[in-house]
Amino acid sequence: MERWIKNLKTATPQEGFELAIKLAQKGIEYTQPSESIRKKLRPKYSRDADSLIAASQVIAIHYQTVAAANNYWGMNTRINSK
């Protein structure tokens, strides 16, 4: 397996969201390693509302993890310093 995650640190929340999407995509690649099968299945799930909602939920969970790893990009410090 390719080692592509060095850490979960990102400079901004936007970069964190993009990392969450990549984590979700990589999870699919690990679960179904055949690119041809993934391409064959995509037209069906890309039009299914439940599948799209499930994909969004996976991304949201990954984003929570990335945000926590980044101390919510310093928001706790700003809130506590007021």
Image (cartoon, grey):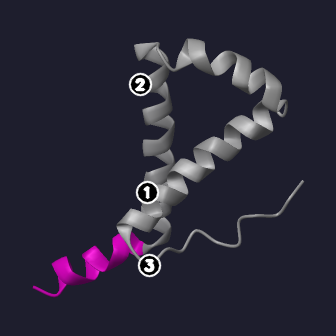
Residue 2 lies, with reference to residue 73, above or below; the image says above
The answer to which image quadrant residue 38 occupies is top right
Mark 3 or mark 1: whose residue is earlier in sequence? 3
Residue 75 belongs to magenta span: yes
Residue shown at 59% from the left, 16% from the top: 43
Q: Pick whichever, 74 or 26, lies toward us.
A: 26
Q: Which residues are magenta?
A: 71-82
Q: How many marks?
A: 3
- Left or right relative to 66: residue 24: right
Say which element carries label 2: helix
Q: Position of residue 31 (x, y in %)?
A: 77, 32
Kindly identify which residue carries mark 3: 11
Q: Which residue is mark 1?
A: 17
Say which quadrant the C terminus sits in: bottom left
Residue labelled with disc 2: 53
SS category of the residue bearing label 3: loop
* Residue 33 counted in the magenta span: no
